[in-house]
Image: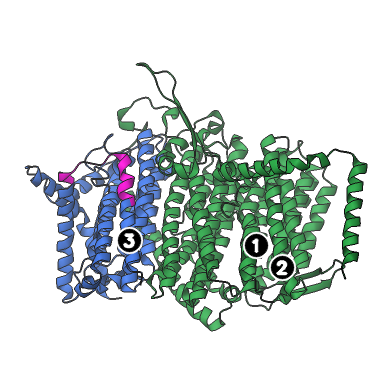
Amino acid sequence: MSLSALLPPLLAVTLAPLLLGIVTRTKAVVAGRVGPPLLQAYHDLAKLMRKGAVYSHTTTWVFRTGPVVGLAAVILATTLVPFGSSSALLAFPGDMILFVYLLALTRFVTVIAALDTGSSFEGMGASREVTFSTLAEPALLLGLAAVARRTGSLSLSGMVPNLTLAVWAQAAPTLALVVAALLVVFLAENGRIPVDDPTTHLELTMLHEVMVLDHGGPDLALILYGAAVKLWLLGALLVGILPLHGGDPWLSSAAAIAAMGTLAVITGLVESSMARLRLTHVPKLLVGAGVLSVLAVLLGWR
Amino acid sequence: MLVLALAILTLGGCAALCVRHSVRWSTFLGVTSAVAGCLAGLIPAGRVLLGAPTQSLRVPWDVPYGAFFVAVDPLSAYFLLPIFGLSALAAVYGGQYMLAYRGEKALGVSWFFFNLLVASMALVVVARNAILFLAAWEMMALASFFLVTLQDEDESVRDAGRTYLIASHLGTAFLLAFFVILGGGASSLDFDRFTPSSHAGLLFILAAVGFGTKAGFVPLHVWLPEAHPAAPTHVSAVMSGVLIKTGIYGILRTLTLLAPLPYWAGWLLIAVGVTSGVLGALAALLQHDLKRLLAYSSVENIGIVALGLGLGLVGLHAGLAPLAVLGFAGALLHVLNHALFKGLLFLGAGSVLHTTQTRDMEKFGGLLKRMPGTGILFLIGAAAIAGLPPLNGFVSEFLIYAGAFTAAASVDSEALGPALATISALVLIGGLAVACFAKAFGMIFLGEPRSDQAAHAHEQGRAMRGPMVLLAAGCALIGILSTPLVGQLAPVLEQVTALPGSTVHAALGQVTGILGSISLGAFGLLVLVGVVVAIRWAALAGKPLAAGPTWDCGYARPSSRMQYTASSFTQPLTDLFGPLLGPRRRFTAPQGFFPQAASFTTETPDVYRERLYGPLFAGVQKGLSAFRWLQHGRIQLYVLHIALTLLVLLLWKLAQP
C-alpha cells in the first residue's frame, strides 16, 4: 500500500459536493441564468449541520440510524474505487462485489428509515427505490464482469490501470457498451434525470428525495453528503473505464479529475435537454442497460 | 458418542410421550432431552471437523441388504453442526412457545415427534447404508408430518400436511430407484461398496429430483410454502433452517458417490439455482403472510446454494480448482448461514405471531416500540438474509460471486455461460431480497400499528429471546470473522471435490486472504459508523430537538390507514414480474365525484401448484378413476386380490428357470 492509495478517498470526500455545484451551474447556464455559486452544496451542508432537528412521534432509532449507517457505508466504499493512477486503499479480488453491496446497505437503511415515518409519501419513494435499483444493479455488476474478462483482473484496482488506449483499440465495442450501461446506472442510482428529478420534492420526484422528506438538520446533511459521495464514486467508476491511464501518474490523475468535471457537465446537459421519463418507462431503460452489459460480456466469448 | 446423542433424543422423546398429560413434565423432559442430545451430538461433529479421523460403527442387521452402518466424516460432521445447533435453540424457544397450546394439545406428543425429527435428521447425515438411510429419511418425513399437522382442526393445515406427505413420498420413490440402481451394480447397499456406475447421468437426475424435492428446488418446492407456515414456529425454524438442507447433503453425498459427473450436471444445478433463486425471491416478495414469505425465501436461498454447487461442478469439470473451491465453499457456508438467519427470522416471526395472533403483514406495524428486543434481532436477521455487509449472508454470497467472476475472467470459455447466469441471478436475487426484507421489517416493526392486535403487542419472555440472541450473534460473528471458519472447511472440501489436499489448501489460502480483506472492511464499517455517530452527536449537542407528527408534506391528520402497506410497497415489482407469477388482484376503483369505498389487494398463489400440479393431478385422478370399481370397501374381496397377486407372483417365480 502506498501513500497514493489515500488519494481516491480523500478526493471523494472533499470534492464530491463540488460535482453537484457543477451540475447545477451547467443547468443554470443552459437555462440562461446565473445560478448559485459552485460551492453552494458546501454552504448548504454547513448550514444543515448547524441546525437542530424535529423527529416524528412515529419514528424510532431506526430513523436516526439510517443516515449514519448509510453515510458510513458510502465512505467505506470510497476506499474500494481507484482514481486516476492511484489504486484503491482496499483492493482485493472481488472488491466490486463489496462495493455494490455497500451501496445496497445504504439503500436498505435509507428505505427502512423512510418506512419508519409511517408516511405514504416516503413509503412510495422506498417502494420505487427498491424496484429500480433491483434492475440497475445487474447492469452494473455485469458490466464490471465484462471488464474483468477483458482485463483478466478481478479487482477494480487491477482492472482500471489496464484500460489503456491499446486495450481500448482492441476491445472498443465491449468497453463502449460498458460505458453506456454504466452511464445509465450512474444517472439512475444517483436519482438524476431521466430517472428522477433531484430538484423537486413532491409528486414529480418520487424516489430519492421523497424518501428523506422527514429528515432535517444534521441528519439531512449526512444524507445529502452521502448522496454526493455516491455520485462521485459511480462517476469515478465510469471514468475509470475510459482510456486515461498510462504515462505520467500526475497527468492521469489530472485527466481523471477533468473527466469527472466533464461528466458533471454532461449530467447537467442531460438534465437540461430532456424530461424525466414516465415511471412505467424507467424499468425499460434500466433493463436496456442490463442488456448492454450482457452483450458486453458475450462479446468476450472466445 | 453420536449414538448416545441419538439415544438421549429418542428416549427423552418417549419419556415426554409417556407423561404427555402433564404439561410441566412433558415440556421439561422434551426440552431437556433435546438440548442434552444436541449438545452430546455436537461433540463428535466438532472433533471430526477439527481434524479427528472419521469414526464409524457397523452393526449387522437382519433386514436384507441392511446394516446399522453409521460414520461421521467431515461432510456429515459439517451438516451435524446446524442440525444439532439450531435444533437445541429451537427446543429452548419451543419450550415456552408451545405453552400457548396448553390444554388444547398434548404437548408430550409434539415433543416426541420433535425429538424424533432431530434424531432422524442426524441419522440421515451419518447413515452409510441405503436401507438405514431410507428408513431415517422416512422417519424424518413422518415426524415432521405429524408436527406440521399439529393444528389439524384447521382445514388449511390438513391440506398442507397432505401436500407435504405426497411430495415427500414422491421424492422418496426417486431415491428408492436411485439406490436400487446404484446398489444393483455393487450388489450391496453400503455406501462404501458402491462402485462408479455407468449410468451416472441417470442416477444424478434421480438424486436431483429425490433430494431436490426435500430441498425445495423449483418446481418441486410446492409443499414448502404450505407446510412451513402450518407447523408451530420452532418447528418451522428447524424445517426451513436444517430439514431442507438434508436435501443439499444428499446431493453432496451423491457427488462423492457418482464422481465424475457429466458436464451438464453443473449446468443443471445452475439452471435449478437460477429458477429457484429468482422465482423464490419474487414469490417471497409478493407474499403478505409472514411465514409463507419466509418459506419462499428458503426456496430462494436453496437456489443460491444450488448456484454454488453448480459452479463448483463446472469448476471441477473445467479443471479450475479455485472455481471449484469457491463454488463449494460458498454453497457449504451458505447452508450454515441460512440455518442461522432463517432460524432467527422464523423465531422472530414466531414471537410476533404469538403476541398478535395473525400472520397477515397488512395488520402489523409499529411493533418495534412494543417489542424492541425482538425487533432489533429480526432486523439483524433481515439484513443478514438480504446479503448485506458486515453480516454472514454477504460472506457466503461473496464466495459464490467471486467464483463466478473467476470463471468470467478465466480464458476457458466453457465456464463463461455459467458465470454469466450466476452473476445475473445472484445480483437480481440480492436486489429482490433487499426489497423483500425491507418490506418485511418495515411493515411489521415500523410505522404505526395497522390493527388492534398490533397495537397491543408485547415483548416475549427470555426463553424465546435467548436463542435468538445466540443466532444473531452467530450471524454477526461469521460476517466479521469469516476467515477461520472458511479455513476449517478444507477437509469437507477435499471430500466433496476429491481434489488433492494441497490444491484445496492453496485455493482456500487465497480465499481466506480475500476474506481477511472483507473482515478489514467490516471493521472499517464499524469504525466509520462510530465516527459518523460522533459527528452527528457533536452537531446535535445543545441544539433544540423537537418532536411532532410525521410531516407528510404538510398533511395535518395522517392516520395509520394511510400508510403504505405490504401490497402497495411491492406493487411496482408486482407489475413488472407479474407475468411470471400470476398474482391475483382485487381492485375496486373509486367512483363518482365523492368516492366512498375503494380497495386494492393482491394475493399470490403458487403458480406451479395452480398451473402445473393442479392439472397434472387432476389428469392422474381422471386416468385412475377407471380403477375405482376395485375400491368398494369389502374387505374379503381385498384379501382375495392380495392372495391372487401373491399366487401370480409365485407362479411367475416358479416359471423362471
Residue at label 2?
B181
Q: Residues within 10 Å of mark 2 (few under 14, many from 20)?
A: some
Residue B42: horizontal and vertical position, in percent? 68, 65
Residue at 49% across, 57% down: B274
Asked if marks 1 and 3 fall on the same chain, the answer is no
Residue at label 3?
A295
Give the chain letter for green. B
Tell me what hue chain A is rendered in. Answer: blue
Indicate which disc, 1 or 2, sits on the residue closer to the N terminus.
2
Residue A116 in view in this figure: no
Secondary element under disc 3, as helix, strand or loop, is helix
Looking at the rendered structure, the kind of residue marked 1 is: Leu
Residue at label 1?
B206
Q: Is residue A262 above or below residue B100?
A: below
> What whole-number distance in Å separates the C-alpha atoms at marks 1 and 3?
36 Å
| CB contact under 8 Å: marks 1 and 2 | yes
Residue B81: horizontal and vertical position, in percent? 64, 64
Residue at 82% across, 42% down: B22
Q: Is residue A282 found inside the magenta-colored segment of the image? A: yes
Residue at 41% across, 75% down: B412
Q: Is residue B115 above or below residue B597?
A: below
**Which chain is home to disc 1?**
B
Which label was assigned to residue B438?
A: none
> What whole-number distance in Å separates the C-alpha atoms at marks 3 and 2?
44 Å
Q: Is residue A128 left or right of residue A264?
A: right
Asked if marks 3 and 2 fall on the same chain, the answer is no
Span highlighted in magenta in the image: A271-287
